[in-house]
Image: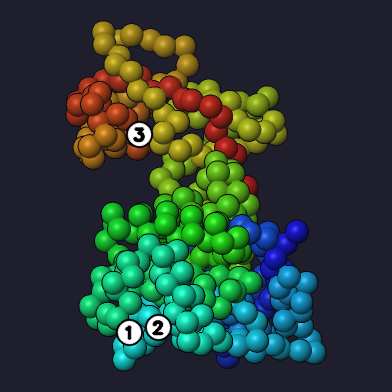
Amino acid sequence: MNALELHSICKSYGSQRALENISLSVPTGSRTVIVGPSGSGKTTLLRMIAGFEFPDSGSLALNGQMLVDGTREVPAHQRLIGYVPQDGALFPHMTVAANIGFGLAAKGVARQERIAELMDSVALDSSMANRWPHELSGGQQQRVALARALAQQPRLMLLDEPFSALDTGLRAAMRKLVARLLADAGVTTILVTHDQSEALSFADQLAVMRQGRLVQSGHPLDLYRYPADEQTALFLGDAVVMPARIEAGWAHCDLGRIPVNNHRNNRSAQIMLRPEQLQLISAPNGLAQQDGCRGVVTECDFGGNTCTLTVELQTLSADERPGRSLLVRSSGMHAPPAGSEVHVSIIGHAHVLSEP
């Protein structure tokens, strides 16, 4: 069952088209991430769902209740949707307890018990109840904002880049904490971000937006392995994209002969490989391999457990132009140094990208 249904949502600001024909289903209890570059329309779409803005056309339904269609527009305060903005937006003149309890119908002892329960659920010590927002760290402020949103027992939780202002290590820890809390509460969640690694790790469903359009949606692994086009491939991570001739399930390209994930024949196309699909072995004394090709390591970017290598492929062209350069990921402990001759082989299949 789907908690949220968007159908043909459109929005313009003057002559500027912000959203164009957006249709998306969000399964109940899932975590959907809307990802895209700045200006792609993802925050505008989130504001439409929250009820802060209304579309020019299209419909929006939550748990079977129509919130927006051609005849009605349910305002934000009647939607029972939780919203956590990027900066938390805590009330600076209220304590932690007062922020969390803002809007709670319960009073007296019941209210205090509910606040204590919410603080415990987001891993905030009870001793912090009387602190002011400026006395909290960034991560603690975000947890207070999340507790305040959960206090209303929302049918849907919207997160607008809530981790972007946090340090890298804290960002990953908060992402895991929030994912676990929302899963335990059974709350359907939509996160907006421009961080592709955050999107891939948090999402059950990933929706990629570009220039106001929904380019592709589905399971994060499927989008990472089988992106719709080159722009999507490069946005979701490093990628090796090159021209090839497809024939009988094989791509013939600068890397040699590579199996592909479709069998369209006798046509030119762009193929994509992720850097982790390229495997290097030393190639001393002109050692030849049946598959793959030879290359030379020109740069080595050491990153601890993982090393990113730049490999220049050997070319057979008569004019002796430099070959294509590729990025290859290798174990930091066993990465060949710059200047090494290597043989490049492929793990798995190449993905044939759609024509633009």
Contact (CB < 8 A) between labels 1 and 2? yes
Secondary structure type for disc 1 = loop
Earlier residue among tags 1 and 3 = 1
- Can I make out residue 304 in this image? yes
* Residue 175, above or below 347: below
User: Residue at the spot x=42%, y=11% of the render?
Assistant: 289
The residue that mark 3 highlights is 328
Of the numbered discs in the image, which one, if any, rests on residue 99? 2
> How many numbered marks have been drawn onto this rendered protein structure?
3
Q: Is residue 195 left or right of residue 332?
A: right
* Camera-side mark, 3 or 2: 2
The residue to which callout 1 is attached is: 95
Left or right placement of residue 321 versus residue 23 in this view:
left
Q: The C terminus lies in which quarter of the figure? A: bottom right
Question: From the image, which quarter does the N terminus lie in?
Answer: bottom right
Query: Distance between the Cα atoms at labels 1 and 2?
Result: 6 Å
**Residue 332 bears which disc, if any?**
none
Residue at the (34%, 88%) spot, across then down: 94
Dot 1: within a 10 Å radius of its alpha carbon, few (fewer than 14), some, or many (20 or more) residues?
some
- Residue type marked 1: Thr
Q: Secondary structure at mark 3?
A: strand
Residue at the spot x=60%, y=39% of the render?
A: 352
Q: Secondary structure at mark 2?
A: helix
Q: Is residue 111 left or right of residue 29?
A: left
